[in-house]
Amino acid sequence: MTRLTTCADPATVAERATMHVAAVIERARAERGVAHVGLSGGTSPGLTYELMSRNPEHLTATELWFADERCVEPDDQESNYRLARDTGLAGGAIADGMVHRMRGELGPGPGAEDYASLLSERLGGSGPPVLDIVILGIGPDGHVASLFPGSPSLQAGEDSICLGIEDSPKPPPQRITLSLAVLRAARSCLLLATGAGKADAVDAMLGDPSPHVPASLLRRERLTVIVDDAAAPGPPAR
């Protein structure tokens, strides 16, 4: 069952999220000696990254991965890697050698192949690579990572790892994303949402699973959702 926590404001969401991620990292290190954390872009995750970077002692033996990336240079304003770097997380609290960025500058197809190979090499085994936690935002349309409503990418098989996107409905159109299979294989996912513009998406995500709401396809028993009051789903209609 999905765990839903509602907080007063975005700052409190980031605080709760940071505590949750720290606990997951600690447990992963205790059980396997290293923690593998997936990052997304967006304002809500960005606030969490800022808080995480202030406590580098909580991030030892932690490797960073990315749930998706725009096909831009790493210094571009649109780059998710740049967000992680500018918030002090990638290359700051966590050394560059432990940060595995998606090489968006390669383009969708080659970039996806490159990242799939890296994930398989580092986390390979039977089935999809398994991350300890993936931190996700949610779009107003219910998309997560770069998996958009009704996209053929949602139908990629269980052996898919990373996908090249040529026609994202949200600019820029060319992207790289982890597959739904990898998101569902993660030991846990943390979805963050703030602002009234996300309330309908959060409500839809908690409803019946549907390819029209990609976030609803995440594994509910492994999903934690933290939202602020503005993004909280409303009471059921009577």
Image: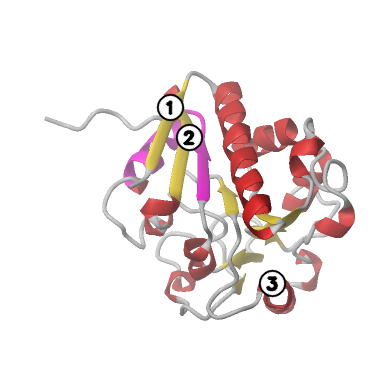
Q: Which secondary structure, mark 2? A: strand
The residue pinned by badge 2 equals: 226
Q: Which secondary structure, mark 1? A: strand
Q: Is residue 49 left or right of residue 11?
A: right
- The residue depicted at 80 percent of the width and 67 percent of the height is 105
- The residue depicted at 37 percent of the width and 52 percent of the height is 220
Q: Which mark is residue 230?
A: none
Q: Amino acid at mark 2?
A: Ile
**Span of residues in magenta:** 189-204
**Marks 1/3: CA distance?**
33 Å
- The disc, 1 or 2, on the residue closer to the chain's N-terminal end is 1
Q: Position of residue 208 (x, y in %)?
A: 26, 53
Q: Is residue 126 left or right of residue 86?
A: left
Q: Is residue 180 above or below residue 42?
A: below
Q: Say if the magenta span includes residue 193.
A: yes
Q: Amino acid at mark 1?
A: Thr
The residue pinned by badge 3 equals: 119
- The residue depicted at 77 percent of the width and 60 percent of the height is 101
**Observer-nearest residue: 134 or 81?**
134
Q: Amino acid at mark 3?
A: Leu
The residue pinned by badge 1 equals: 6
